[in-house]
Image: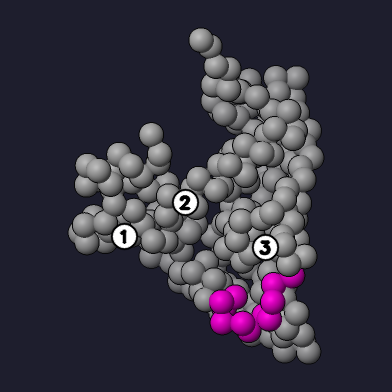
Amino acid sequence: MMVGTAPAANGVFLMEAVWTRFLPSINRAWDIIASGELGEVQWVQADLGFVSAYDRNSRLWDPAAGGGALLDLAVYPLTWALGALGVPTGVAAQATLTDDGVDMRNALTLSYANGAVAQLLTSIVAACPGTATVSGNAGWLTASTPQCNPSSLTITTADGRSRVESFGQVGSNYVYQLREVTRCIQDGLTESPTMPWADSIATMELLDAVRGQIGMRYGSDQVTV
């Protein structure tokens, strides 16, 4: 059954809980990009990582729990690439796998029809700065760290003029996401325009393509007849 068929048919709400998508700072970044202030986006860079001691019983290192940097962290750098450039036409991936087949680090290069490129890094064995930069032919935008929850954006024009836009935060990281769910249900919607089903499907198709390239398999990938 296609994603969305069941909730739409039954009048219930369904949304992937990607909390970063609902933050005011992230949505402001999309507005700046859409305004053309940066010109045509040519390049996106984003990274996210931390050091996690190996523990086969931890979900991060357990293949049965979908462990690894890709499924735990890559959605956040991907948020920047997909938000700034959309779905890529191609992806090239590299990764280092444990003996259990869990990726401890990965590097993704996304390519686009207009020649733009996104370079994304995630790791559970390296302390990364957690940066994100969107570069166009008229300037660039840099998110404060961590890029999954930036408190400020720095916008710099090609001639070197900069400004900083800062953002307060209400409650915990999930407040804005919860507000969106409440709004959608009150309005009788079955999906969120901010996090539509199509975006969730496109992201998972991209992650599946990466897994195919780096040779990462989970037990659920085995189909028995």
Whether residue 93 appears in magenta in the rendering, the answer is no
**What range is drawn magenta here?**
32-43
Q: Is residue 222 above or below residue 139?
A: above
Relative placement, left or right, of 91 versus 24 is right
Q: Position of residue 181 (x, y in %)?
A: 31, 55
Q: Amino acid at mark 1?
A: Arg
Residue tagged by mark 2?
A: 198
Q: Say which residue appears at 69% left-offset and 28% top-offset.
A: 216
Report the mark closest to the observer, 1 or 2: 2
Seen from the viewer's position, the closer of residues 98 and 194 is: 194
Cα distance between the residues tagged 3 and 2: 24 Å
Q: Secondary structure at mark 1?
A: helix
Q: Mark 3 = which residue?
A: 132
The residue closer to the viewer here, 199 or 95, is 199
Image quadrant containing the N terminus: top left
Q: Earlier in the sequence, mark 1 or mark 2?
A: 1
Q: Position of residue 30 (x, y in %)?
A: 54, 71
Q: Residues within 10 Å of mark 3 (few under 14, many from 20)?
A: many
